[in-house]
Image (cartoon, rainbow, N blue to C red):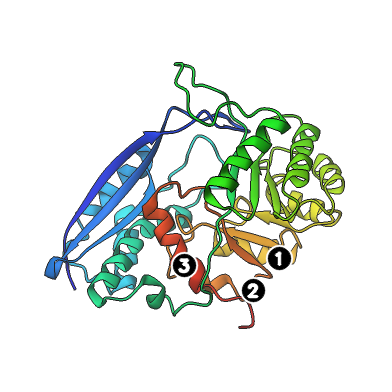
Amino acid sequence: MKVLDARLTPVAFADPPLLNCRGVHEPLALRSILELVCEDGVGGLGESYGDAAFLEQVRNVLGLLPGLDVFDLPRLRETVAEALDGVVVTDTHGLTGGYSIDKTLASVYSLCEVAALDAQGHYLGVPVVDLLGGRARDRVDFSGYLFYKYGEHADGTTDRWGQATTPQEVVAQARTMVDEFGFGSLKLKGGVFPPDQEAEAIEALADAFPDHPLRVDPNAAWQPATSVKIAERLDGVLEYLEDPTPGIDGMAEVARQAPMPLATNMCVVSFADVAPAFRAGAVGVVLSDHHFWAGCATPWRWAPPARASTSDSRCTPTATSASASRPWCTSLRPPGS
């Protein structure tokens, strides 16, 4: 089934004044939607980043998509690689790990591949999970994502969530999420306040939600010694500790002493990172994001060598990306199955 047209739509939507180790979110978050218009009136949608550097590279690909067969994913990847010609896209925040030619290719290809899979599913009348090998589970749980946040943006814009800078306010934010959306686990974006203050917030969450698995992610803002100290303090409280410190070597140093598994979406961001990270004992959980792991049909390849894997939805704030995450997670089989 041939692509007749490819349309890219940049999207900006309101973003609260959320805090992380790099500062505060801007009033608008940027995304992009790719629509493939195919033969027989079939269409497919994909979503990804919306910053100018990324959009520039996607636009370099758009004119080459008409005429391709949406079922020929290898040719689609070759086309994206030819258009990018070795370019490396970077960002200003560094919250998704390092940059490389392979990661840039994977990110742009992912946008196109998800749209192609969506078109395939519409054409065949089957859910995308069937195109990925069938479902391995009937349910995919999403984690509530808690942020420290200001009560308003610099321009005075407010939102219904209000301020969250104290443990009590973080618990209130979590209570709203759990009560309204039914989240069964919670993750706090850290790296904002002193580590002991953030540990206090996690302890407050554990008291308020004793049956909810908890995680904290300081985005590699802590030194190894600090990471070990917080890990020991939160022994029996955290399900896992995400990216406490930079790099595979730093993570391995912490992992040797931490009582819980370490998770990452910063030091393992490509297939080339998997073997070194596991040889070093740096991670127990790989948080894989289809946006930079080359789409939905590719990342299952690393499941066998990984001891554990899960899907982190930090970068999927809109319905199109969440719709791509669900079939991928549903199809992913644990090692040995």
> Is residue 166 shown above or below 240?
above
Residue marked by disc 2: 305
> Is residue 96 shown above or below 14?
below
Judged from this view, the residue extending furthest toward the bottom is 337
Closer to the camera: disc 3 or disc 2? 3
Q: Secondary structure at mark 1?
A: helix
Q: Secondary structure at mark 3?
A: helix
Closer to the camera: disc 1 or disc 3? 3
Give yes or no for contact between labels 3 and 2 (Cβ–Cβ under 8 Å). Answer: no
Give yes or no for contact between labels 2 and 1 (Cβ–Cβ under 8 Å). Answer: yes
Spot occupied by residue 182 in the image (x, y as percentages of width and height): 56, 53
User: What is the CA distance from the residue labelled 1 to the residue labelled 3?
Assistant: 23 Å
Task: Work out which quarter of the rendered image holds the N terminus and state it.
Answer: bottom left
Q: Amino acid at mark 1?
A: Phe
Say left or right for 166 vs 76: right
User: What is the CA distance from the residue labelled 3 to the residue labelled 2?
Assistant: 18 Å
Marks counted in the figure total 3
| Residue at x 55%, y 64% (from the top left corner) | 271
Asked where in the image residue 294 lies, by quadrant, the reply is: bottom left
| Residue at x 31%, y 65% (from the top left corner) | 118
Spot occupied by residue 60 in the image (x, y as percentages of width and height): 26, 49
Spot occupied by residue 198 in the image (x, y as percentages of width and height): 74, 36
Q: Amino acid at mark 2?
A: Pro
Could you say which disc has been placed on residue 278 in the image?
Answer: 1
Say left or right for 277 vs 72: right
In this view, the residue in front, 85 or 129, is 129
User: What is the CA distance from the residue labelled 2 to the residue labelled 1?
Assistant: 9 Å
Say left or right for 220 vs 323: right
Could you say which disc has been placed on residue 328 in the image?
Answer: 3
In this view, the residue in front, 223 or 239, is 239
Say left or right for 220 vs 49: right
